[in-house]
Amino acid sequence: MFLKRIQNRLKIVILSFLFILNAPNFVYAYDGSYWTQNVNVFNLSCTDGDVACWIDERNALDTLPLIMYKPLKVSEVKKKHHICVSFPHLKDSYWVGVAYGIISEGRRLEQKITLFEAGGYTNLATQLNQVDDCLNNEGDALIIGPISSNGNAKQIELIREKGIPVVIIITGINTEVDANSLQSFVNMGYTSCKWVADQEKLNKEKTNIVWFPGPPGAGWSIASHEGCLSALEGTNIRILETNWGDTGKAIQLKLVEETLLNHASGPEPNFKYIVGTGTTIEAAVGALRARKLGKKIKLVSTYYTPGIDMFIKRGLISMAPSDQMISQAIIAVDQAVRLLEGKQMATLGKPEFNNTGRITEHVQQQILIVTPDTYDKFDSSTTLAPKGWSPKFSVD
């Protein structure tokens, strides 16, 4: 009974996060010198593994403040700070988009940015060492997308004990921090799998899907998995197979090809949808085309990339949600500077106390659902880096 209540509440809360592309409350403007955007702010700040917190009724949209996030103006910034930024990797265009947001806002606020990437989700030790090296080199603050919600926690606790502000971006952490700029991947996984269930709700037969949640052990992929399972509870959708793996293109392509060999070698495939990471779905487009299965198997991503964008425009992918990662990144830089200079946070003290009694600002971007039918209404400026942009690892 408890689990059922949790699932029902999760459905109510996460459905409230979804955002229709032509809704009137979406505002974003960025001219290189100043930007504003409507965002939601959590009433209750959550650590990554605290699912009960994520689905708390106080975090439903009808109780979340919707504010116009107004960042600092350059004239309001007292000095140049050294902000260390750590990503799990830059192997896919999702994290490249995050890098673009960080670098762009660092330049706008005239801050020193040093960006590191660990090379993959299996390289926790590398990320830990890179963070220590940067902060020991006169780093003033840390913005980090943790590889592991648990594995990075102790280091972050020690950093904060030294009075160094920590801002979490994209992937959550199971400890307290000073600010969050992220959308829960519980919501992202839920959104994609719920969309599939809605497409098939009139189908009296069971519909099989193959599910690719991402790297084993990564906080965001575990969260995505939990969200998907919740969305499919009580529906006619059955997960035929779950394939965990790093989001490198070669690894995901191999997983997709193995799945097709095992479940789509006969006259008809044993499943109707591939649902998974952006890298998975990009790889699947070519794999399906090579086997002439493009009209028999539908593709749904759990996040947005330039490749996903191109394939949705061409009608080769059925749906992908965007968590507006560029916007998450630029807000994270603004949060870091405010913390360093003792300025009031842009959300005026929200959220309220978390379950340990400490205030932690948590800004959440609204999820944009993009399909071939809604593509023309989609503004990609908060999601995709400009075409041809390549990561810069420092701003002085």
Image (cartoon, rainbow, N blue to C red):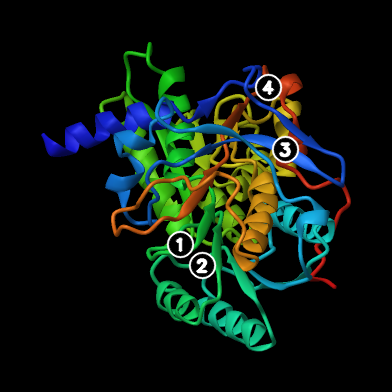
Residue at x 38% of width, y 66% of height: 175
Q: Nearer the viewer, mark 4 or mark 1?
A: 1
Badge count: 4
Q: Position of residue 172 (x, y in %)?
A: 46, 57
Q: Classify 284 as above or below 179.
A: above
Q: Classify 285 as above or below 237.
A: below
Q: What amino acid is labelled 3 in the image?
A: Thr
Q: In whole angstroms, how far apart are the C-alphas of marks 4 and 2?
A: 32 Å
Residue at mark 1: 218
Q: 119 or 115, which is in the foreground?
A: 115
Q: Earlier in the sequence, mark 4 or mark 3?
A: 3
Asked if labels 3 and 4 touch by Cβ distance under 8 angstroms, the answer is no
Residue at x 73% of width, y 58% of height: 102
> What is the number of the mark on residue 36?
3
Looking at the rendered structure, the secondary structure element under dot 2 is: loop
Residue at mark 4: 372
Q: Position of residue 391 (x, y in %)?
A: 80, 62
Residue at mark 2: 147
Looking at the rendered structure, the secondary structure element under dot 3 is: strand
Q: 226 or 157, which is in the foreground?
A: 157
Q: In whole angstroms, how far apart are the C-alphas of marks 1 and 3?
A: 31 Å
Q: Nearer the viewer, mark 4 or mark 3?
A: 3
Q: What amino acid is labelled 4 in the image?
A: Pro
Q: In whole angstroms, how far apart are the C-alphas of marks 2 and 1?
A: 6 Å
Q: Earlier in the sequence, mark 4 or mark 1?
A: 1
Q: What amino acid is labelled 2 in the image?
A: Ile
Q: Classify 178 as above or below 301.
A: below
Q: Is residue 155 left or right of residue 390?
A: left
